[in-house]
Image (tube, rainbow, N blue to C red):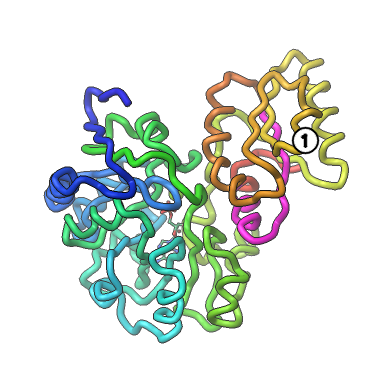
Amino acid sequence: MNLNAAVKVISVDPLCPDRAILAQAGEMIRQGRLVAFPTETVYGLGADGLSAPAVRRIFVAKGRPADNPLILHIASLNDLPRVACQVPSSAYALAERFWPGPLTLILPRNKTVPAEVSAGLDTVAVRIPAHRVALALINAGRTPIAAPSANRAGRPSPTTAAHVLHDLGERIDLLLDGGETDVGVESTVLDLTVTPPCLLRPGGITIEELKQVIGRVDLIGVEKTDSGPARSPGLKYRHYAPQTPLLLVSGAEMVAKIIALIAQYQGEGRRVGVLAGEENSNYYKEADYLVIIGRRADLLQIAKNLFAGLRRLDAAGMDVLVAEIFDEQGIGVAIMNRLRKAASEII
Ligand code: AMP
Ligand code: MG
């Protein structure tokens, strides 16, 4: 990777990060600076989560609306009481099963956490990430790290260091390049301050997995995003969206509809990009640009490649993008949630 004039990019071994590099990165966190780093879900834009000025820099760098709260990343369960209070036993049961991992819990906020982190809410979002670079950074910084996804607000989340550089290059102080992220979609967000616990964002941990541990999970937070009041402020914004208009095509006739759309748009002189699964790739040969993000039968692979696929299509100079829908099972719930929010139209 090229060194950007403004941001320092350092490659780190994702399995065995160099201690001296991480010590330097941790020092920058303590100085209130912005460090982008890999997690198992997507790249995060990190700052000292207990410093209000540092946290405010995250919002400025991303262009993130001030009412969209951040997730605090901790490295050990021992740090949970530092950031949350009145932690219910269900949180410990979930932590035991899924941490480190892509599950974010909403808990009552400890007042030592600046209000900026939570966008003024009296709750806080917290998780332990399952990535050695992320954990090493939190330990080296000796503080919880507030980190949203390291993209410009509204854009697809970054799954490689190159994506971060593209979106935020001149706006951050350090970028730790630990290669491609594993899960590819963000963490599941679960609100434990209500009964029953309420799913606010589907993600890397599936609803079925949550139910195995805590029984009932209310899905109203996800289902209400387009109509009723948003329980999680960030859910009301358009997200993950390429700059090129994206049409999401559903229904039993999906393949036939996409083939017809390609012909129709091209007839209007417009260049068409298609995002699809491998099984259908032969049908879309007429597309001006075709991005295959994995086998439709392998939703983990689709999730991993989804955001990179959207970014590739956006960079290809097309006039319009058309995407397949995917099976809404397991991590497919998260995939479809992201695609719906990325789409300018669903047919
Ligand atoms: P990001 O880190 O960019 O993936 O975004 C974090 C997500 O967690 C957003 O959807 C936020 O709205 C949500 N979130 C963070 N803190 C809270 C909170 N205290 N209550 C509800 N949702 C939250
Ligand atoms: Mg985000």
Query: Badge 1: few (under 14), some or many (20 or more) residues near its Cα, within 10 Å?
Result: some
Residue 57 drawn in magenta: no
Q: Which amino acid type is shown beneath numbered disc 1?
A: Asn
Where is residue 329? Give x, y as percent.
Answer: 69, 60
The quadrant holding residue 255 is top right
Q: Is residue 286 visible?
A: yes
Residue behind mark 1? 280
Tell me what residue is drawn at x 17 percent, y 56 percent: 141
Mark 1 element type: helix
Q: Is residue 198 left or right of residue 332?
A: left
How far across and how far down the image is residue 111, in percent? 24, 73
User: At 76% across and 22% down in the image, what residue appears?
Assistant: 285
Choose between 31 and 10: the one closer to the eye: 10
**Position above or below: 118 against 32:** below
Residue at image point 35% right, 31% down: 165
Q: Is residue 122 above or below residue 147?
A: below
Is residue 322 a member of the stretch shown in magenta?
yes
Image quadrant of ligand 1 equals bottom left
Q: Check the picture and name the quadrant holding the C terminus.
A: top right
